[in-house]
Image (cartoon, helix red, strand yellow):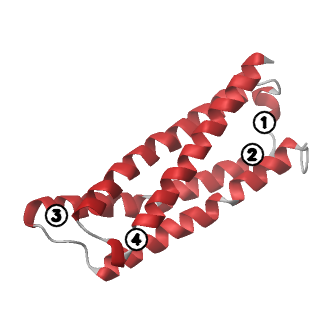
Amino acid sequence: MLLESVLAYAHFLAIFSVVVFLTSEAALCRVEWMNAAVVRRLARLDLIYLFAAIAVLLTGLARTYWGLKGMGWYWHQPLLHIKVTLFALIGLLSLKPTFSFLRWRRQLDADGTLPSADDIRSVRRLVMIEAHVLVLVPLAAALLARGVWTR
């Protein structure tokens, strides 16, 4: 029971970290706030966001492997597959913002220019879509934890 609690704690901590860093990106990625410090901060936040997302994946896998219900139960549940699919979708959506933040930083370092307003709005839109898809993951988790649609 202690292992299950520690695994749950680690998973929740990783999830909260993803939420914090994705929210930070959404808050900073605005045309009216963009400056050199924000460009650098966005690239740094995005790297931490990547590590937090990896931690979510690893702790989630650990919960299915070492958790009380075991892999056999978890991996036969449609809601787990929905959660994993949503997580993968968020990962795919995050690729363009990641590459944009890195490009913006390289551009800033090379010639001191900031990204265009259209580029910032485009990237912010994707970050916001990520954030809105992310709120569906805990819904699937809550349903799964309570046995809804389980086999």
Question: What residue would you read off at disc 2?
Answer: 80
Question: What residue would you read off at disc 3?
Answer: 108
**Considering only order in the chain, which callout, 1 or 2, is on the residue closer to the N terminus?**
1
Q: CA distance from mark 1 to mark 4?
A: 35 Å
Residue 121 horizontal/vertical position (percent): 40, 78
Find out whether the residues at labels 2 and 1 contact each other: C-beta distance under 8 Å.
yes
Q: Residues within 10 Å of mark 3 (few under 14, many from 20)?
A: some
**Considering only order in the chain, which callout, 3 or 2, is on the residue closer to the N terminus?**
2
In the rendered view, does 81 fall on the left or right side of 54? right
Amino acid type of disc 4? Val
Question: What residue would you read off at disc 4?
Answer: 123
Q: Residue at x 8, y 66 (%)?
A: 111
Q: Residue at x 50, y 41 (%)?
A: 52
Q: Residue at x 83, y 45 (%)?
A: 144
Q: Residue at x 74, y 45 (%)?
A: 80
Amino acid type of disc 2? Leu
Residue furthest toward the bottom? 118
Residue 99 horizontal/vertical position (percent): 32, 59
In the rendered view, does 16 fall on the left or right side of 138? left
* Residue 118 sits in quarter: bottom left
- Closer to the camera in the image, 103 or 70: 103
Find out whether the residues at labels 1 and 3 contact each other: C-beta distance under 8 Å.
no
Amino acid type of disc 3? Leu
Q: Quarter of the image for the C terminus: give it.
A: top right
